[in-house]
Image (spheres, rainbow, N blue to C red):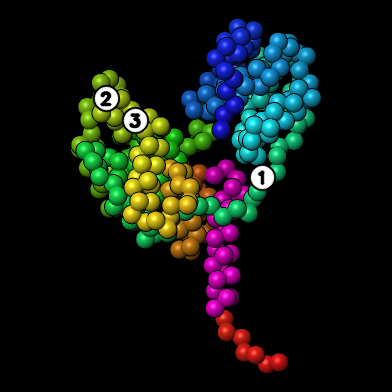
Amino acid sequence: MRTKPDAETRHLVSEVYQEELELFLISMKTSGMTASTQQAYLDEAKGFLATIHPKPIGAVKKPDILKHIALLMQRGVGDGARNRALAGIRAFFRALIDMQLVQANPALEVNKAKEEKNRTPVYLEERQLETYLREMEGKYYCRNLVILMLMAYAGLRVGEVHRLNIGDVQANRNLHVLGKGRKWRVIPLQESLYDLISEVIRQRIEPRSGNEQALFVSQFGRRISRRMIQHIAESTFEKMKHSRPELAGLKFSSHKLRHSFGTNQIRSGTDIRTLQELLGHQSIETTQIYTHVANQQLVEAMGKVKIPKLM
């Protein structure tokens, strides 16, 4: 959940802090941040600036940032979203320090919210995944099916699917994936998935631009958008819920397909370090959320043990 001010306030913020925002954008571009990260951080910076407007940037102190975080809490923004807002503000001041506009980063004095770490991710069992994928239909069946399978059976993020180019699919069945922080990872594809991707390339719509190398192309001849990828996943979830009423109460999104990959890998015996590499997590702590599923399996297994009544 991003914290965007209304149109009038956005206009005022863009005018009053034009230089700072322009330099922030330049800093993000030159540091190699992805376009989605740039936009997310820019939105968070503008949301914060709307809170302090018209105070000069150099006069911002820790209480100003705490006030912004408190306002987010009042609006019902969760811990994770507030931490993302703080990350954007920190990046904003870090850029301004590099550009010699300010001397200190007051956002570093504000602690991140403690997020719930032991929450088991919502995911689909292997049989549920098969049921889910069978709901796929339509004119662009093969393309859309592979998009879903790359998230569910290769663990890709929406943004990573969006960024895939034809050249990222190697003849040795390796898939080169550009992940967060502009870090590449290599995912060995199963033969069946590789063959489906090859079929997508064969059916690929001719892009409007001769320079476009996108693997997944929209009906308009452009690289398929992140929002369209999310829509494909979410609309298929809705179809599945109609045929499987017991799933109606669960909240599914495109990211749950990646959760399904991580969870099913752990359940099949993949070690956590290998899973960290496959998912492209920078920290092993992020991957450890999937171990709670394995722990639950232990609980269920112990629940089946029959203990005799001796007293």
Residue 237 against residue 304 in the figure, above or below: above
Q: Residue furthest bottom?
A: 310
**Amino acid type, mark 1:** Glu
* Mark 2 lies on residue: 220
The answer to whether residue 175 shows anywhere in this view is no
Q: Kindly report the distance in space between the C-alpha atoms of the residues bearing marks 1 and 2.
A: 41 Å
**Amino acid type, mark 3:** Ile
Q: Nearer the viewer, mark 3 or mark 1?
A: 1
Circle nearer the N terminus (3, 1)? 1
**Amino acid type, mark 2:** Phe
* Residue at horizontal 45 percent and vertical 40 percent from the top: 157
Tell me the tag on residue 224.
Answer: 3
Circle nearer the N terminus (1, 2)? 1
Q: Kindly report the distance in space between the C-alpha atoms of the residues bearing marks 2 and 3.
A: 9 Å
The mark total stands at: 3
Label 3: element kind: loop
Q: Which residues are magenta?
A: 281-304
Q: Is residue 249 magenta?
A: no
* Mark 1 lies on residue: 115
The crowding category of the residue bearing disc 1, from other C-alpha atoms within 10 Å (few below 14, some 14 to 19, many at least 20), is few
Q: Main secondary structure of the magenta part?
A: helix
Residue 40 against residue 240 in the figure, above or below: above
Tell me the tag on residue 76.
Answer: none
Q: Is residue 288 magenta?
A: yes
Percent coordinates x, y for residue 206 in the rendering? 22, 27
| Closer to us: 31 or 253 | 253
* Residue at horizontal 23 percent and vertical 34 percent from the top: 204
